[in-house]
Amino acid sequence: MPSKNFSGLNLSTVSTFIGDVFAPGLHIIYAVAWYLALEGSLVFLLEPGRTWNLDLSVIAGIVTVLLVLFYLRVIDEIKDYDYDRVYNPDRPLVRGLLTIKDLGIYLLLTAAAVIAINLFASPVLTLLVAVNLAYALFLIWLEKISSIVRNKMFVNLVVTYPVNILLSVYIYISFLERYGHSAELPGLLLVLAFVLAFLNYEFGRKTSWSPSPPPDQRLYSNEIGRIGAIILWTACAVAAFGLVVGLIQPWNASGLEAAAGWLPVLWLFPVYKGLTRFLRGMKQEPESETKTGLLTSPSLLFLMAFYILLVIHSFIVNNPAWF
């Protein structure tokens, strides 16, 4: 039975593509947790005692984050095509499931939806998200013409990471506009903590304990060594933890609020497990190592725990009457 089509799209192919590279269930949880963790923590820090309003604008913001994450995933599928042909041959574009033209249509429709949603929210948010989408598109061209940007990990990080940072800035500005608040240092430091938390994930999924991975494989450990990379990975998590606990100051609270304030200590468990796993992997003989030797799993666990535990903390401290 032929697949149904809508506006020139093969819906079966769209569904397969999303399932292969986007993991919709995980990304929905991720977008919800990211948005609520940052906004809820901003309410606690900058508007103590004020009711946390979870209204339609929050839903619009979460949908925006989710759609932009999908947009960025499509961008990566295009700009990493040559690299994926060698190291990720199961990618949909590499195996011919769809074409560059198909991905261009995905980008166009996603961008239109994001802009439409934010036109009803705020001109500032609309402009911010439009700049983010345009910059991400620019990266396809930039990486195509510049081998340094394409292959040097830290140069690439500096150039590409703003698309992720701007999503946290988007949530921050949305909060400021909804609550009529002005920018303050605690809020900016909280955004920095979110930046560091994601950097832990970024470094973890591209750092290998293998002593001799392919030299052209895009790994941070290929540029600064395994020890340097694991130190950087650990430092990002510890710095994010320190910033958040310093801002929350659970030692000044009592009862359930104090207990919720110490929840970030649990973030250190996946960091400890990842660190010991990495060091143990370094001691193995090359022939006994796993195929990848990466820290993707503990890094993802840290990131999701970072968001979800902050959501729990925010619900407790911003809604004391519920508890």
Image (cartoon, helix red, strand yellow):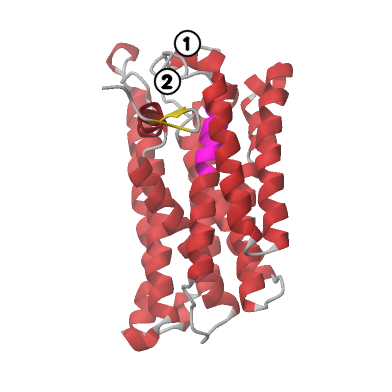
Indicate whether residue 76 is drawn in magenta.
Answer: yes
Query: On the rendered image, what quadrant is the N terminus found in?
Result: top left
Q: Which residues are magenta?
A: 69-77
- Provide residue 206's location: percent of width, then percent of height: 49, 29
> Label 2's element?
loop
Name the amino acid type tagged 1. Val
Q: Dot 2 corresponds to which residue?
A: 91
Q: Earlier in the sequence, mark 2 or mark 1?
A: 1
* Left or right of 128 on screen, residue 106: left
Q: Nearer the viewer, mark 2 or mark 1?
A: 2
Q: Quadrant of residue 323?
A: bottom left
The label shown at residue 86 is 1
Label 2 crowd bin: few (<14), some (14–19), many (20+), radius 10 Å: some
Indicate whether residue 87 is drawn in magenta.
Answer: no
* Left or right of 238 on screen, residue 90: left
- Provide residue 248's location: percent of width, then percent of height: 50, 73
Between 2 and 46, the residue placed more toward the observer is 2
